[in-house]
Amino acid sequence: MQSTIPSCLITVLSDHPLTLADAGAAGGIHQRWLRLGGYLKVLGFEPDHREFDLLAERSDRVWINAALGERETEISLLVTRHQTNTSLLPPNRPIVDRIYQNPSDFDVMKTVAVPCTTLDAASRTAQLEIAALKADTQGTELAILRGARRCLQATLLVVELEVEFTPLYREQPLYSDVDEFMREHGFMLVDLGNLLCHKWRNSASLGGRKGQLLAADALYFRDPESFRNILTSTAEPLRLLAHYWALCAVYGYLDLAYEVTLGQQNSAWMPSTIFAEISAWAEMNARKGKGFEIRGRGRTAAWLRNLADKVDPPHHSHWINPLGNE
């Protein structure tokens, strides 16, 4: 991280590490977050005891054995045969049985009563201001967002969500519902990655590599106007700016961080020395990033992608495109 963003913002991060809220924390945080090193704190939520008991204890990690949702209550966790399908929502059997080769992976083996809290309540109790949210909870992501209205209004800068395009669980909101909510709260879609394309149950060896698009990871950043509004309303705008840059670095969108910063050049809170250092950093890194122009590289890239499609044998499911510029 030291060489990834301007040093003046590293200084701010040293005093104000950013906090990631991880809903559905099975397996721990994604490797991309390790880039932040000591500039990161984690507030994680995992209701399934099987996975919660495996989470490593650290001074900069707070793990809560609870679900996240729209309100504080007790709720039923439907524990499925395959752990990754466990949800607060029942499987949509007609669709699951039609698409999946092993629909029994969605069989509910037991129902467990678990505590449910909200991100607003949990962050207030932990005395942490949430800069980023990652939610992968099998269909309840919109409920989590509705329980995070204070965070969305004041501190959240980046949100990564699993979204579905077809209802694998009964009464689950789909991508269009989530996207509308995020846009209404001042966020813009930056990327759709980890696209899950799934062939139907009896036709894996027919047709091309991709099947029906079922799900993806959606990456949202606070849009420039919304970001400008919270910068002018907070007592610590430099902290938020440093967090925004660090999050852009995590996902590989430093161009976005710089463009947003340019829009703040004449803001009363922006020190001229900080803006000058960021501008100098951007100019230096732009020169490094120009690289070499190679004739025909577009055609070569297209040929390689086509070759990969032909070499990769047909499967029931394919994950396509990592999230961000990785």
Image (spheres, rainbow, N blue to C red):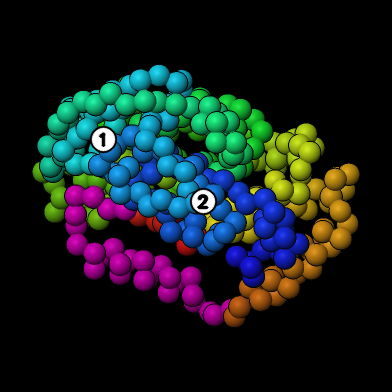
Compared with residue 50, is residue 36 higher up or lower down, i.e. above or below? below
In this view, the residue in front, 263 or 63, is 63
Q: Name the N-terminal-most of marks 2 and 1.
A: 2
- Membership of 106 in magenta stretch: no
For label 2, the crowd category at 10 Å Cα-Cα, with few meaning under 14, some 14 to 19 and many 20 or more, is few
Whole-percent x and y of residue 200? 18, 42
Whole-percent x and y of residue 173? 39, 26
Q: Which residue is mark 2?
A: 60
Whole-percent x and y of residue 82? 19, 41
Residue 213 visible: no
Q: What amino acid type is highlighted by mark number 2?
A: Asp
Compared with residue 243, is residue 161 higher up or lower down, i.e. above or below? above
> Which residue is at 49% across, 56% downward?
33
Horizontal arrangement in the rendering, residue 285 relative to residue 64 (left or right):
right
Horizontal arrangement in the rendering, residue 150 relative to residue 306 (left or right):
right
Q: Secondary structure at mark 2?
A: loop
What segment is highlighted magenta in the picture? 293-319
> Which residue is at 72% across, 65% downward?
7
Compared with residue 101, is residue 109 higher up or lower down, i.e. above or below? above
> Which mark, residue 86?
1
